[in-house]
Amino acid sequence: MSALPPRLVDLLRASRARRGPLLSDPATSAFRLLNGAADGVPDVTADLFGDVVVVSLYRDLTDAEETALLDAAVSAWTPRSVYLKRRPREARVLANVAKDALAPESAARGEPVEDFVAKENGLSFHIRPGQGLSVGLYLDMRDTRAWLQAQASGLTVLNLFAYTCAFGVAATAGGAKRVLNMDASRRVLEWGEENARLNGQSVDRYDYVAGDVFDWLGRLAKKGESFDVVVADPPSFSTTKTTRFSAARDYARLAEAAARVVAPGGRLVACCNLAGLPSRRFEAMVLEGVTRAARNGKAVGSLGPSGLDFPTPPGEEPALKVHVVQLR
C-alpha cells in the first residue's frame, strides 16, 4: 500500500483553495474539503461542517500515518475539531469490527462537539460527529436536494431510506404539499423530525414511518397510494429483519416497487452511491424495474455531486449516480 503523499499540508491547503466559492457562500457551511485521489490524497476524504472536519480513511494507515494526516489537517485547515472515521471497503466488515475502532466518539484533534448546526443552501441540519460513521448529512446529495426543492411546490413526495430526512426538509422548504419520510431506523427519523423543526417546519408523526421500505412500498401500492415524486436513496448494502439489499444485485427490484407508487406523470429519482456500479448499468437496472412494474418510463435527466467539491479523477465516473425517470 502506498504511503501518504509528500508535502501533505500543501496538498490539503490546495484542496481547500479549490473550494473557494463554497467557502465564501453564506448559505452553505457543509461540503467536501478533500475528495481522495482527485485532490491528490488517495483513500482519504474530509468533510467540512462549519468549523468541524470529519476525515474518512478507506484503507488502513499506520499509527504514524494517521498522526501525520491529522496533524496536517489541523495545520492546513485550522478547524475547531477533527473527527476520524475508518471505513472498510466491504460493508459486511462493519459487523465484525468494534464500532469505537471505526468511528471513535471523541474528537481525534481539538475539542469535543456533540451536536451543532450546519447549513446547506440556506437550510439547517443537526450534525453529530461522534455518532457513528454517518454524522447527519450526505454532502454529495447537495445539488440533488436543491433540484428537489426547486421542483417540489404543490407536489406529494415519498422519501425512501430517508436517514435524517434532508430530502424531506428540502422538499417541504420548496412548498411540497406532503412529504412522507421512510426509514428502517426510528432513531434517525427522530433526528429528521428535529431537522424539520430546526427549519420552522411542522411535524406530523404519521409522515415519519419506521420499517422495512420494501414492506411499506407493497402496502402503499396495495392501498392505491401514489406520489408525484419518489426519491430512492438506499445504502449500497443493508439488512433488515425481512430484507437483504445489495444495490448491485437488487436495484431493479427496488425500482419496480417504487415505480408502483409513482403517480401518472410523476417522477422516480433513483440514487446509487456504489462506486463499482457503472452509470449505464445502473440506468438499465432502473428502467428494467420500471418495466417490470408495467409502467412506461422516460429518462428526463441525470443529477449528481457538484464537481467543485466532489471532483473525479480523469477517466473515472463519480461514485454517485442520480437517474430521474418520468412515468406514465
Image (spheres, helix red, strand yellow):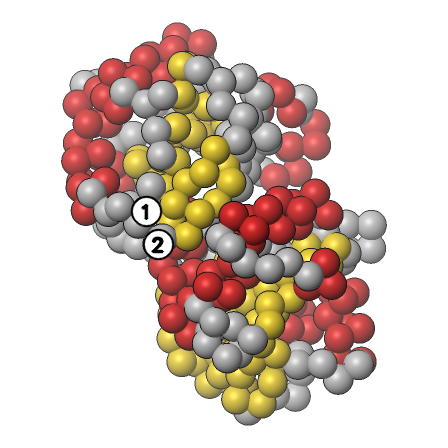
Please give the residue where the numbered disc 1 appears in the rendered image: 28
Tell me which label, 1 or 2, sits earlier in the chain.
1
Q: CA distance from mark 1 to mark 2?
A: 5 Å
Is 23 placed left or right of 321 in the picture? left
Q: Which of the two residues, 93 or 201, is positioned nearer the viewer here?
A: 201
- Which percent across, then down, holds residue 287? 54, 78
Q: Which of the two residues, 244 or 267, is positioned nearer the viewer here?
A: 267
Quadrant housing the C terminus: bottom right
The residue sitting at 40% across, 80% down in the picture is 300
Please give the residue where the numbered disc 2 appears in the rendered image: 121
**Disc 1, SS:** loop
**Disc 2, SS:** loop
- Which percent across, then down, holds residue 174? 44, 68
Instruction: Give the amino acid at mark 1.
Output: Thr
The residue sitting at 30% across, 17% down in the picture is 74
Q: Residues within 10 Å of mark 2 (few under 14, many from 20)?
A: some
Viewer can see residue 224: yes
The residue sitting at 49% across, 83% down in the picture is 326
Viewer can see residue 274: no
The residue sitting at 66% across, 50% down in the picture is 189
Quadrant position of residue 242: bottom right
Instruction: Give the amino acid at mark 2.
Output: Asn
Q: Which of the two residues, 327 or 186, is positioned nearer the viewer here?
A: 186
